[in-house]
Image (cartoon, rainbow, N blue to C red):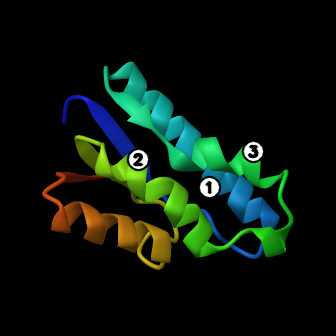
Amino acid sequence: MNGFIYLASPYSHPDLAVRVARFNAACKAAAQLMLAGAVVFCPIAHSHPISTWMRDDEQSHGMWMKQDIPLLARASGLAVLQIDGWLESRGVQEEIEYALANAIPVKYVRP
């Protein structure tokens, strides 16, 4: 994939330590893609620090997808980070469905 890649990865989990581990895995994968020459947008790297400024009741799946889907719509490709939880992640699955429905190439990457 060349151009702007959207890196999807799971994030939500009741345990903060799991969310932080997923954030770190997403940042590492984004760095590796960037070092390989890709231009990358990593919504978890962007949103995790922002989420710390919001109460839990101010955040919802729909609110985050409203932020993410317009960016995915402009991407030339979707990279899906296959870390623990990616298959169960509602957001990741919606991002894959959106990409496939809109002819955005999907690539699966392992950590």
Choose the circle earlier in sequence order: 1 or 2.
1
What distance separates the C-alpha of mark 1 from that of mark 3? 13 Å
Horizontally, residue 74 falls left or right of residue 18, namely left
Secondary-structure class at tag 1? helix
Choose the circle earlier in sequence order: 1 or 3.
1
Q: Nearer the viewer, residue 28 or 79?
A: 79
Q: Amino acid at mark 2?
A: Leu
Horizontally, residue 14 falls left or right of residue 92, namely right
What distance separates the C-alpha of mark 3 from that of mark 2? 18 Å
The percent position of residue 8, horizontal first and vertical second, equals: 43, 54
Q: Which residue is mark 2?
A: 71
Say if 3 sits above or below 47 in the image.
Answer: above
Q: Amino acid at mark 3?
A: Pro
The percent position of residue 44, horizontal first and vertical second, equals: 58, 50
Q: Which residue is mark 3?
A: 49
Residue located farthest toward the left when viewing the structure as drawn: 103
Residue drawn at 53 percent across, 48 percent down: 43
Label 1 neighbour load within 10 Å: few <14, some 14-19, many 20+: many
| Disc on res. 22 | 1
